[in-house]
Amino acid sequence: MKELNIELKNNPYKIIVENGLLDNVGKYISDVYKGNKIFIITDDIVEKLYLKKVINSLGGYNVDYVVIPHGEESKTLKYYVYVCEELLKKDVRRNNLLIALGGGVIGDLTGFVAASLYRGIPYIGIPTSLLSQMDSSIGGKTAIDFYNRKNILGAFKQPLRVLIDPLTLNTLDDREFNNGMGELIKHGAIGNKKLLDLLLDKPKINEDIIVESLSVKKKVVELDEFDTGERMSLNFGHTFGHIIEMKYGYKHGEAVAIGMLMALKMGIDLGVTPADCYPTIKKILELYNLPTVEYDYKEYLKETFYDKKNIAGTINFIFLSELGKYTIYKLTEEEIKEKL
Ligand code: GLY
């Protein structure tokens, strides 16, 4: 069993990582939840795989659940309303506990319900996809999509605890597993050279690797809980990645892989990133079958200025200053024209 403490002043919490943890959920929540009623929110795929197991592990609690269809279409107002209505029908109270059992959609939606229903209900995340274990389940960003925009209605709401069972990765198909690897590799690139060295040997993704990766996100979230500064380092590969994801329909982690290579090229051209960072990251991406197709970053620079992270005509690009270290580099459209 491995533990990481997210040390936030008002909302500190633990991430527990353990093989087979889904059989022991009750044991791992009893010190933070003293009530009796628990509502699990999950989707129709995770329901079949793990719901029974988790309910069985919660002996002694009064457990009920709400199931929604899997997929991004459920991260909408329609299913936000559905989940709230189902919970209210089942007489949810503000001191009950919600458990988000599933991938990023379940985590983001349940977190937003937990942030807003009764102005806040405690919730615990049990992320079951590698992508959600690596990213969205940590750091308290909750949201639904609305008005054709991703994550536009949301709130910061830190979970009471995050429980990760690496054995859930065994039921992911290869493409979904590699999708999560995109974010895991990103953590190595911006904050943990040791993790990159380990990945070069293509290890099995176990408790240790997950904790090495999450220790990077932990530091960043502790520095910047509400995403006003350092947290933007997590966007390494995302500025170009989002454009590529929207345009060509890659999965998120795949687009981040391509976006990291584009950011590396740009950083090298600007003299910020040492040239040898590129082949190392590319090799690791290849080991995990992530796309390494070359897209010319210069062709996409204009579009970066339409990004929601564009603040007053300046883009904060995230580059590597060495393997395992990032730097935030501000550029205006005019500066880009001058320098590149
Ligand atoms: N997904 C980026 C963040 O949590 O800030």
Image: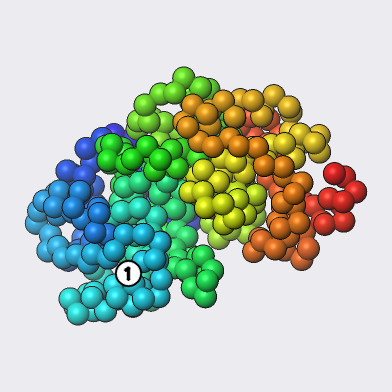
* Residue at x-position 36% and y-position 59%: 71
Residue 90, compared with residue 188, is above or below; it is below
Badge count:
1
* Residue at x-position 17% and y-position 43%: 23
Q: Residue furthest left?
A: 60
Task: Locate the C terminus and report the quarter of the image it occupies.
Answer: top right
Residue 212 placed where, x, y %?
45, 33
Q: Which residue is tagged 1?
A: 121
User: Is 122 left or right of 55, judged from the image as shown?
Assistant: right
Task: Locate the N terminus and report the quarter of the image it occupies.
Answer: top left
Q: Nearer the viewer, residue 81 or 210?
A: 81
Q: Nearer the viewer, residue 109 or 138?
A: 109
Q: Residue furthest front?
A: 248
Residue 185 placed where, x, y %?
52, 35
* Residue at x-position 29% and y-position 75%: 82
Is residue 280 visible from the viewing direction of this image?
yes
Q: Which structural element holds mark 1?
A: loop
Amino acid type shown at disc 1:
Ile
